[in-house]
Amino acid sequence: MAATTGTATDRTMYLLAIIMLLAYVTLQVAATQLSSIAFLDSKTFRAPLLFLELKMIFRALAFPIYLLVNTCVKLIRKRKIDIHRTIKRSMAGFTDGDRSVPWSWKHSLIKIGPSVAFALSLQICYTLSGANIPTAAATAVFSITVEISYLLSWLVLGQQLFLIKTIFVLISFAGVALVGYASFSGGSNGLGESALYVGVFCGIGAAISMSLFQLAFRRAFPSADLGQSCFIVTIQHLLQSVIFAPVPAIAYYTGLEVYNASEIPIGLLIPSWFGYCTATIVYTYGLVLSSPFFMSMAELVILAANSVIDPLLRKFPMTPEQIIGTCLIAVAFLVMVQPNSRISVALRRKQPPTLGTTESTIELTKESGDIVKTGIDTSEMTISDGILPSKKDRDMEEDSDEESNKVPGFDLVTAVDLVPGFDLVPGFDLVPGFDLVTAVDLVMSINSIPLGLVVLGTIMLTLAGSGLSGRSMLRTTNTNGNYSKWSNRSAIPYMIDSAFTAAENAMIKQAILAVQTALPPSCINFVETPSTNNIFKIKFTPLDALGKAQVYCYSYPGKVLNDEKYATNRGQVVSLARGTTGCLQSYCQIQRYIASVLGKRNEHQRGDRDSYITMAGTLAVPGAFTKYTVSEAYWGIYPYDYCSITHNQPNEFAAAGIPAFSLPATAPVKTIPPPCALSLTDCKLISMLYGCDSSQCKQPSCVNQIGQATSGTTVPPPTTTPGPPCLDFCATTTNIDEGAWLLDGRQVLFSGTCYSVVNAGTNKITPGVAAAKQIAGLFPTTSTGAVITGPIDSAWRSDANTLHILTNGVQYKCTTTTCTPETPAKPKTEGVFEVVDTTGAYTVYTIDATGANYIDDSDASSTVVSNVFNSCESQLPPTCTNPLKTITAGWATGPDTVSVIGKDASGVQKLSLLQNIPVANFLTAGGETQPYC
């Protein structure tokens, strides 16, 4: 090839180095995205330790891939192929290029030992960082590797600092700090202070370990070319895989990592692993062309790229801190990537005399046909420029008998080394502001293994019992290897047993909707699935496996992995029992078990709970308050949550005359509120488990929720099982009703075995005035002596003085004095009171003498809904002047009562009453004095 000028060659090498840097960034981001998708799509593969082991093995293929590419180039160029010579020359990287020195394992291990030691230090520090702060935050902290490397190059290697570049290194640090701040979802809110400090300091330690690794590698291999670098990378990763191999093996055989080999997403993982391996080679080639500092700026590019990519792919907004930080990183990168000769202000280092001026050529050796660079003009360059190589550089390899040309001060940092914690994060290695399906989440937050097994097997096992165990364990979530989170959060399948009544069916759906809507938008979506569908699903049932009624309610903490043992009919049981020992008195109680099946464990059983509640010496059921161990749950990153929907009341499982626990005087609250919704911490915890934006949780803090009002602890009666809340949900103003009828001019809301009356002026329930009461007090005793206790499936009127009630499979005809059983006019098979969750949609319920029917205007166009209801949304007659329009489809005569439940155009839940036909003298005064549920 004809000679070119030094300036042209400089430009070519600079552009090629830029291409390598961007190619590395592209490959790294693509590989991490593929691996994340693989973890998300798999139903049973939750083995991050196995994933890491296989990734290291694939990265050890760097040298075989180099041999393959080099051989293909020679075949294309029709050059001599001598693989033995190529291998021998590549092995000379361990002898500083002297092929006369025999290669030995002992010498190579001693030479590479310090690098491996610093790599292990990096892995330990990054693991501890990720165990104490969100993974995205740990990644952002680790990105200060660029700044630390820049300083160490000056302090240790004596390289010149340049004013403009130093300024923009500091600007890049500011950008990283802003992106890292955003990754905490609004700072340190909700994080334990100790855990925050430990996580940040360990992240800094990981960055320092990375820089020390670079220095150790440079001292050990100062003159490796590309072929030698690939050989060193292969040896390094083989050693790491051998050291790490016992960890996933122990995890598998002890059941801490549970997976089915047949369901491993090989189609996605293999391209991901090859992507990591290719990124390693590209990065190494970039180092041959440029310098360690130049290629280390890929960390900044990856951090900035993911801060833009993740909001686009995951459809959540970027915070102002992310936007500003990303812009600062981008500007700093564009300046720092320039050669020092263009932006230098300080005095520049003089060129060492060993680097003389030569003519620049790129040619092919006649003997081997390998691509060789010779004679790069360096007369106007400095080592600290870090962009162009010396004349002793090589693109591929040189198989001549001459001494191999080398890169002075060559500092190899492979793709695997730039990924924090040896790519502990299998999904998104560098994801600012997004904590999704990472190894830390899978291992620490969901179900995999204790912190001790994450790093170096038994070496770190002692951490589980040390002082770190309390503050390093993430959240109050399940860690039992038998369970995991539900893999597809956008479609969690469930079925409701047909043994439930229609009202119970509706109550369960209302509880599901309440949990779903309490979480950030589109975070969790439950999908009702037919029982005939063989997909593994949640099965709500009041029956045991023998078809007998359950006595108690329970739910497994997350998705059962060993479904043959814990599931029936491909359905994971959530037991919802009836009666005083059950949880069907209101939809509030059901929510607790839905939170549990999503992975939330009981707050009052946290391992550190003795610091927040004082347990009684005697309990009716001591096991109900047994503290979790680290093999069952993790806690600590969120403060103790007195308002969690999973927190017991003092009277639950309490012995006679003694509350199960009390609150210390130092507690921030004075009482445990009866739970009826996810708390702020519940929302943030479940959101983080499922990769949702926890900053979208809008619940008030626990202190704000229940106030600072003082109240003494009432000594409870003896109980052995948790009873219903003392105040039913229909006495609140925050929940929609299950059914609404007008009786003697008033609107009555029915819920389970309770009822309440709406204030006609405000269309809301007034606490203390129209609180929830037993249905038994609302109706007279039947002609057979039976008492109607509910729940009511349906109720309608055939005339002004007759009310028909369908409850517990029996239909009653009630007058002003008695209720008589009658033959059901229409069997009740489906719930009448469904909840509409589509903005602008309404469901019209029609009750007449033939039974219950409804029309939903959000259904298919074949449903006739025109002129069915008007715009009298939350108004009562006579305020609503046009209460009912003509119904022209489906009924011979107009209905007696029509109610409409739905959301208006603003998404606000509404209740419309479209007809007011009084039933004279139906409610008795005695019914108004019944106690709470």
Image: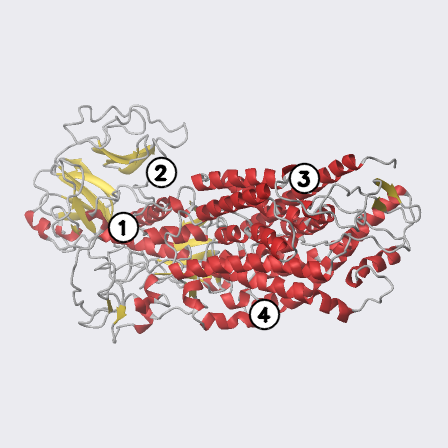
Q: Nearer the viewer, mark 3 or mark 1?
A: 3
Q: Which residue is mark 4?
A: 250
Any part of residue 550 in sight: no
Query: What residue type is disc 2 on?
Result: Asp
Residue 336 sits in quarter: top right
Numbered mark located on residue 341 in the image? 3
Query: What residue type is disc 3 on?
Result: Ser
Numbered mark located on residue 837 in the image? 2
Query: What residue type is disc 4 on?
Result: Ile
Q: Which residue is mark 1?
A: 809
Circles 2 and 4: CB distance less than 8 Å?
A: no
Q: Quadrant of the C terminus?
A: bottom left
Q: Residue furthest bottom?
A: 617
Camera-side residue of 570 and 354: 354
Where residue 18 appears, as percent x and y from the top left, is 68, 40
Distance in Å between CA atoms under marks 2 and 4: 47 Å
Distance in Å between CA atoms under marks 3 and 4: 54 Å
Q: Quadrant of the N terminus?
A: top right
Distance in Å between CA atoms under marks 3 and 1: 88 Å
Where residue 481 appears, as percent x and y from the top left, is 50, 64
